[in-house]
Image (cartoon, rainbow, N blue to C red):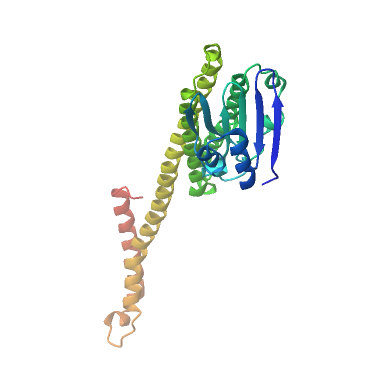
Amino acid sequence: MGNFQKRVFSFPYFEWIDIQNPNEQEIKSLKKEYHLDGFHIDDSIERGHLPKVEISNGNYFVILRAFTGKKSDNLSTIEEISNKIAFFFDEKRLITIHRASFLFIDHLDRDAFESKTVYDLILHFFEEIIKAYNEPALRQSNQIDEIEKIIFLKDYSKISLEDLYFQKAEARVSKKLIILSQDVIKEIKFPEKYRSAIENIQDNLVKLILEYDEALEDAHNLMHTFMSVSAQKNNDVVKLLTVFSAFFLPLTFIVGLYGMNFKYMPELEWRYGYFMIIFSMITMSIFIYIWFKIKKIL
């Protein structure tokens, strides 16, 4: 979890306060010191909260979630895939509240430190949050392609339904977060001079939505394909067992019949009885084989 951290940065025309891992006492202090809305503060530390935006008297409260899941993990929930950052801002001040550590916050690049307005810094953070989804989207696309190759060209049994479920879950949740983030950014009224930067972020969002939509559809199709291939393999096994049963069931019946060894079974006294039974069994097997060939079962 880590310890509480509070950092204050002074820019020429605004101030940025970054707060990480606040506890209840520190939350109360923040409410009083910066006159923050209690409900907004509660939302900013609530686990699993989805992206949102609220506007009051020109002051913005925004929650966005950056992708923080590890590629080695099976991810299926919002908390596993992402962590949130809450933004409180107006033209003179930006406050960020978060529990997780983010590289783009802990180590600002030179461009961010040269921000002239609060909007420059906010757009920098928004861009970094959205960029966090780029690599996972590409990785997931490659993983789905690899799974498809294994199913169709290699050994489908190396893939489990659980693998496909996590692929589908990660794509579904990531797409939801991207769409909600897109709605949030559309609601914020940036000055006209930032139109180009906003359009660039929106283009990246649309690109990510399409990528995750394709990944979700591919994962969904692969699940059906995997189940169909599994069902076909099972059908082949059942078919093989049925063919064997069809051959051996009548032969087993004959063997069982003449294995009862009753005293008065006339066939047991025949000189060529044994050879007749063997001949009958061979003839029956040939007949079954020819019948299967005619019906195109074999």
Q: Nearer the viewer, residue 58 or 5?
A: 58
Q: Is residue 272 left or right of residue 112?
A: left
Task: State the residue at coordinates (53%, 42%).
Answer: 42
Query: What is the residue that sits farthest to the bottom in this orientation?
Result: 263
Q: Is residue 108 visible?
A: no
The count of marks equals 0
Q: Is residue 34 visible?
A: yes
Reply above or below: 38 against 127: below
Q: Nearer the viewer, residue 98 or 262?
A: 98
Q: Nearer the viewer, residue 215 or 171?
A: 171
Residue 15 locus on image (x, y percent): 66, 25
Q: Nearer the viewer, residue 248 or 63?
A: 63
Residue 237 locus on image (x, y percent): 42, 55
Quadrant of the rendered image containing residue 143? top right
Reply above or below: 134 against 2: above
Task: State the residue at coordinates (57%, 31%).
Answer: 87
Residue 95 locus on image (x, y percent): 61, 31
Task: State the residue at coordinates (34%, 66%).
Answer: 249
Reply above or below: 162 against 153: below
Task: State the residue at coordinates (60%, 43%).
Answer: 28
Q: Is residue 8 left or right of residue 175?
A: right
Quadrant of the rendered image containing residue 251? bottom left
Q: Is residue 138 left or right of residue 229?
A: right
Q: Is residue 59 left or right of residue 16?
A: left
Residue 19 locus on image (x, y percent): 65, 36
